[in-house]
Image: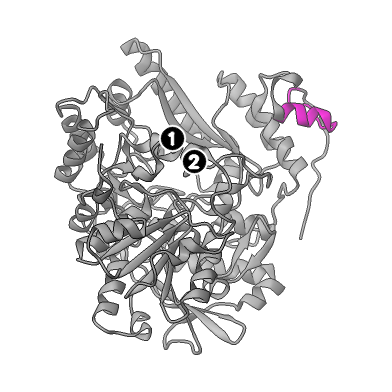
Amino acid sequence: MVAPNEFLPTSAKEVAARGWEELDVILFTGDAYVDHPAFGAAVIGRLLEAEGYRVAIVPQPNWRDDLRDFRKLGKPRLFFGVSAGAMDSMVNHYTATRRRRSDDAYTPGGRAGQRPDYPTLVYTQILKRLYPDVPVLIGGIEASLRRLTHYDYWEDRLRPSFLVESGADLLTYGMGDRVTVEIARALHNGFNLKRLTRLGQVAYLSDTVPEGALLLHSYEDCVASPKKFGENFVRIETESNRMRAQVLAERVGDRYVVVNPPYPYLTESEMDRSFDLPYTRLPHPRYNGKGRIGAYEMIKHSVNLHRGCFGGCSFCTISAHQGKFISSRSEASILREVERVVQMADFRGNLSDIGGPSANMYRMGGRNRALCAECSRPSCIFPKICPNLDNDHRPLLRLYRKIRQVAGVKHAYVGSGIRYDLFDNSSYLDEVVKYHTSGRLKVAPEHTSDRVLNLMRKPSFDRFEALNARFRSVCEWEGLPYQLIPYFISSHPGCTEADMRELAEITKRLDFRLEQVQDLTPTPMTLSSVMFFTGMNPYTGEKLYVARTREEKERQKAHFFWYKRPAGGPAVRNAEKRGYEKPWQNTNKKVRRHGR
């Protein structure tokens, strides 16, 4: 059993056990504290610890009582850091139809209700009220995707930057490995908050527009004109995908939210340093006997190879948060982590995932980085693969072979979804099917309609059908009873019920009984959320049909389950109960359209 003093302290008793009389940084997070490189608070805490700072973590503080969790460690010498956790809290709390979820995968025992809606706002407002003179930094995915005016699906309105609503002194966006250490170093050296506004990958409030900044439409103008909100998004996405981006400024009231350019990517040595820190890879002992933490159970025997994704899917937040340029670890660092996993007491020989945001982008990027520096494409593979992209899978295949040779590893599965539009030859697929598939290989065609796929920035369904044929051929040749598991999305802007009916017919022809499906949740700072709110494609001005109501969304989702009778599942049952068209019947009803 690992002792509490091997974790970052979470209580006054644990701080005292280290002989500390004062803390430099205190991190508040909406997740349980799991000391693992897949959990942001642990990563930031360990990075700061490696720099010599005294760091503590307050996980899931009680915001309803006398606020003792916010007082128990006092005030830090440098700053408070606040994150909602590994997920946007509203995605964590609500379904696509805005129903409250009954569990939380980032809490022991899956107990719901251990964090508020928008913890970034709630925690920060409490800290600024209790300690008005201490800087509060907000970060993590919730703050990152809400750094400027954004559409909030759960309240169905545009909201200003969380800097404005929270009262925080500074917002860090993206992966905070580099910038958080720079902030701590600057404050330790006596620089004031104004000096921090020169750092990359931060956002702050200002009374003036910095010289040379790209001025966006104001928050008030966006509220008055959805078209201007769409125009803002195009500018923001364009700059976030540049290696040399402009400073952005957006007026809110009588002040400006200023966003400095992001760091394009982390170097290999920076990635290795982050992953090689002395994580215990375990939940803190404070959770002993309180139940399993579902998110941890899913990834505890997995190894992340890289960060970032250049797929640029319209509905995905990865590139907006992690960036489109790939940051890869060295083989040596990855193999060291594999060996640490092998030594875990409950490891039985199976690595659950050796992957990343997209499993097969390891070491990929532009052949000529000078050309990349001039590019602002949101995707390196849509609508066609960039001729400058080095999508050679051989480095990844060599790494797979080395992982398979590590003593104690029986199987090393690729649990992340693979991008099948990244390879034309079959060698990568053949090896993944033969050696790295647990029986179910995940891919994400998302839809069958090329028109809808184009709005999603996904390849034609023809590519998936070719992959499916090759997969079946390999399985037949090797005698493997494996399944290809496709992911699909309903209710994406531009998707009509006729498109869903066609999807049902095509997947039935291919003999897919779909199970990995979801109704679109429009998350902040994605093209899909902008199209959902405005009813148009901001890049082209094309007006789009949008399924907005719960009934319309449930009706579209019901088409996934063509193989079920009315009593066979809640989606189909609900559609039948409300008198909707049955997805297993082919009718000629017209689709109702909505506009804003």
Residue drawn at point x = 23 percent, y = 81 percent: 189
The answer to which of 121 and 399 lies nearer the viewer is 121
Q: Which residue is mark 1?
A: 292
Q: Which residues are magenta?
A: 571-584
Above or below: residue 509 compared with residue 208 = above
Direction right: furthest residue: 579
Which residue is denoted by mark 2 in the rendering?
105
Answer with left or right where residue 280 lies relative to residue 228.
left
The x and y percentages for residue 356 are 34, 43
Give the residue displayed 36% in from the left and 57% down from the top. 11
The answer to whether 458 is drawn above or below residue 525 in the figure is: above
Q: Identity of the amino acid at label 1?
A: Arg
Q: Amino acid at mark 2?
A: Ala
**Considering depth in this image, is 372 or 163 the residue closer to the camera?**
163
Nearest the eye: 201 or 222: 201
Residue at 36% across / 68% down in the picture? 262
